[in-house]
């Protein structure tokens, strides 16, 4: 398919919740493939459709060592999150040049519609769990830096502005 441009922060679509997906269609499959191609080109470990301007609840995640293991998700929702947290440096192609250390649950159980249109529940751990949570944030109109204190968030956004 193709690598798509990522919306630049502060595009208002990055702050808008995405619409639910009713069914897995050829159009949805094409968007997923573009998201995977875009994620691989970065390279990254996940992508939410709003990042490329598609306002649907679609996400892809591939935190595998060998790559090519992307999980395609429509309407993902977290059913359970571990109490134990894991810190990871997070960034976004929508706000290049900056990153922040974010603590999120180390493991999550997620329900989503898979590529066959079936409802699936899957456990994600470590970097997989971090990426899934990061992508669900995008689908809800949130960015990773929303998990920072106001002071740290303001500093990060100022650094990003200087980097541009």
Image (spheres, rainbow, N blue to C red):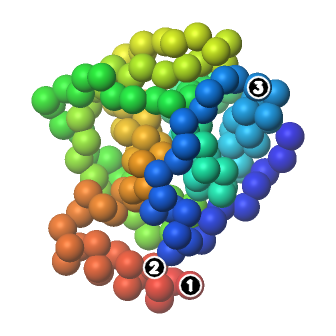
Q: Where is residue 48 in the image (x, y as percent from the top left)?
A: 56, 45
Residues tagged 2 and 1 counted as in contact (Cβ below 8 A): yes
Which percent across, then down, holds residue 122? 42, 15
- Inspect this view and state whether residue 68 appears: yes
Residue positioned 13% across, 29% down in the render: 83
Please name whichever residue, 28 or 46, is drawn nearer the observer in this view of the structure.
Answer: 28
**Label 1 crowd (10 A; few <14 / some 14-19 / many >=20):** few
Residue at screen point 67% across, 12% down: 116
Q: In this view, does 117 lie above or below 96?
A: above
The residue singled out by tag 1 in the image is 164
First in sequence: mark 2 vs mark 3: 3
Q: Is residue 156 above or below residue 37?
A: below
Q: Is residue 150 left or right of residue 5?
A: left
Q: SS at mark 3? A: loop
Q: Is mark 2 on a helix, strand or loop?
A: helix
Cα distance between the residues tagged 1 and 3:
38 Å
Say which residue label 3 marks: 25
Q: Quadrant of the N terminus?
A: top right
Tag 3 or tag 1, which sits nearer the N-term? Answer: 3
2 to 51, vertically: above or below: above
Please tell me how crowded label 3 is: few (under 14), some (14-19), or many (20+) other residues with Cα within 10 Å.
few
Left or right: where 103 falls relative to 22 = left
x and y percentages locating residue 84 in the rendered image: 15, 31
Find numbered disc 1 in the image and state the secondary structure of the residue it sits on: loop
Badge number at residue 160:
2
- Nearer the viewer's eye, disc 1 or disc 3? 3
Q: Nearer the viewer, mark 2 or mark 3?
A: 3
Q: Which residue lies furthest to the bottom in this view?
A: 162
């Amino acid at each position: 398919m193709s690598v798509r441009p990522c919306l630049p922060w502060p595009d208002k679509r990055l702050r808008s919740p995405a619409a639910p997906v009713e069914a897995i269609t050829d159009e949805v499959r094409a968007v997923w493939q573009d998201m995977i191609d875009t994620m691989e080109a970065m390279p990254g470990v996940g992508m939410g459709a709003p990042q490329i301007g598609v306002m649907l609840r679609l996400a892809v995640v591939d935190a595998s060592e060998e790559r090519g293991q992307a999980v395609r998700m429509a309407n993902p929702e977290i059913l359970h999150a571990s109490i134990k947290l894991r810190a990871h440096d997070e960034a976004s192609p929508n706000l290049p040049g900056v990153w922040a250390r974010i603590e999120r649950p180390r493991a999550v159980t997620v329900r989503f519609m898979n590529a066959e249109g079936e409802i699936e529940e899957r456990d994600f751990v470590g970097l997989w769990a971090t990426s899934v949570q990061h992508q669900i944030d995008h689908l809800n109109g949130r960015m990773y830096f929303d998990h920072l204190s106001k002071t740290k968030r303001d500093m990060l956004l100022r650094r990003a502005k200087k980097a541009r």
